Amino acid sequence: MSPNVPAQVAVAVLRRITSSDFHGNRASEGKPVGRRRVFIQTETGCVLGIELDRQDNAHTVKRKLQLALHVPTEESSLVFGDLVLKNDLSAIRGDSPLLLTRSSMHRSSSTPCLSPGVKDLHQSDSSGPVELLGCSSRRAPMKQLVGDAVNAIRRGVDPVPVHSGLGGAYYFRNSSGDKVAIVKPTDEEPLAPNNPKGFAGKALGQPGLKRSVRVGETGFREVAAYLLDHGGFARVPPTALVKITHSVFHVNVGMSGGNTCSRKRQCISKIASFQQFIPHDFDASDYGTSSFAVSAIHRIGMLDVRILNTDRHAGNLLVRKVESGDGRLGGWMDLIPIDHGLCLPESMEDPYFEWIHWPQASVPFSEDELEYIANLDPTRDSDMLRMELPMIREACLRVLVLCTIFLKQAARFGLCLAEIGEMMSRELRGMEEEPSELEVVCMEARRLVAEREVLRPKAELQEEEEGLQFHVECKEDDQDNTYNSLQAFRRHPSKLEESIEEDEEIIDFTHVHEESAASLKGVNPTETTQRNQTGKAYDRDETLPFGTSFVRLADMSEEEWGAFLENFQALLQSAFHDRKCLATKRRQKQRLGIA
């Protein structure tokens, strides 16, 4: 097969080898039981649909792709979220996107990314123009939008590129020419291989603008924000993940030699987020914030806290003027939050909440808002996302659980939205960034987990059996005392490392204990593969760089994670009390006119 194989030929070959080369001729057997359709995406953004039979495994799928797309796949891996597919594909649901990526042990600066043909040819697919991925129970509102967009495409109404922003985005229209959706292909994100605005350069799956959010993974985060907005409380527009095909999409060719762009009008299939377009008058950066309702700021802020939004600025808050009761404009301003691609990072990050200094954020929560917060269930939410977005990484779900627990307890303690946001935000002292109050609590909770694992000799196990009540009382006293050092850790994060080093001089760590303690300093002493509580394999070579993250959550076992949450919740009460005392002192100084 020629390296410049046409897309139609590649699809035809793929169909032939799917039905015969590996499983024999099934024409007389009818449709095989257990067949499901998935979408394979290469590091450079090429997307192709393929049907899997029950007998398929990762090796047969890669072989089919090699024959169909003429790309070498022997040293590649099929990745599904955290899971590197070795053989069994039973965990893969229908309509799921998989990533075909060069194995890390073979990747180097001179190794080309996987791409069909020498010119990184993007293959088209013979399926419909837009296909909804997943089986979301909340995708009903999207079906009408998708239908409107498809009808418009068939009538010759082309999408319109969006010229603002750093990533590629497109307005899809209905037959009347009205905007109905905004589509953001995952391979056109900032730093992604096919970014149309000069910000390309990385393969899908590598660290992105935020080091804890990988290139190509902002799309499912947009969907996650919509799914977590229970009852439309925060007004997140309906959003879905789609496989979408059109000639308007952008392709960069000659990535290693320049930014030459492909202008051929050929249909290109991509994985993208598909979000309902909301007609609006302007965004929040164009209007005075004093006109916004307290409830509007609260509902958006509550969502931002839960998902640890690292990019909430006024430009991604749309404003609609709502008519008053007598039909005149100017009754009130409705806020619609968009652009959630940088939420749910893989580790604790410094969030960006522009609303943190708006006066509405300092108003106490209403009874309805407190009831909404009290009814939030982080375990149920994480289970829901696993079902709806099976490619989501476990570390993202742990961030969701942690931040939701924090919001619930903070609201119960009586903190307002501004105080909650301040506790989550880092401060700069000189040229150094300090961990937030939330991160300090997390650091201490992790230290307690490591301490429990390290200081548990056999004699202590016997003592626990003989005097369980005494042990519980000592543990409670110890947790009360440990919080006294939290502010010291906040002022001098390096002291956390010093304390661990001192412990290492006294205690003879085993291999397991070394790994637990070293994780507190962001060091992985081994390069082995571990598994999380869902049985998914983490490749340590593929984990994101530690960067400026003070706390990592993904490297804890299920038992350690449970113990961490226990300690975390116990320490929060002292942290909230400290925050309230600080706020009281500030108010007293303000009354006395002290700077």
Image (cartoon, rainbow, N blue to C red):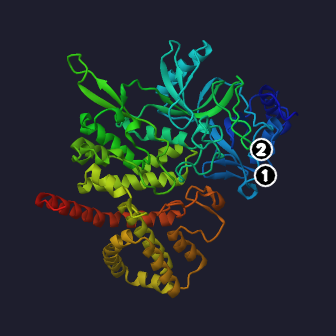
Give the residue at x 22% y 60%. Answer: 583
Give the residue at x 52% y 33%. Answer: 240
Residue 18 position (above or below residue 349): above
Q: Secondary structure at mark 1?
A: loop
Q: 315 or 462: which is nearer to us?
A: 315
Residue 366 in percent (x, y) is at 22, 43
Q: In this figure, which residue is indicated by the disc labeled 1?
A: 75
Instruction: Left or right? Give the position of 345 relative to 95.
Output: left
Q: Residue 360, which numbered label?
A: none
Q: Residue 62, which numbered label?
A: 2
Residue 222 in percent (x, y) is at 49, 39
In contact (CB < 8 Å): disc 2 and disc 1: no
Give the residue at x 41% y 56%. Answer: 402
Three-letter code for the amino acid on which mark 1 is drawn: Glu
Residue 381 in percent (x, y) is at 44, 46
Q: 204 or 354: which is nearer to us?
A: 354
Q: Secondary structure at mark 2?
A: helix
Q: Quadrant of the N terminus?
A: top right
Quadrant position of residue 544: bottom right
Residue 100 position (above or below residue 475): above
Instruction: Left or right? Give the position of 385 relative to 186.
Output: left
State which tag comes first along the sequence, 2 or 1. 2
Residue placed farthest to the left in the image? 592
Instruction: Left or right? Give the position of 121 relative to 320.
Output: right
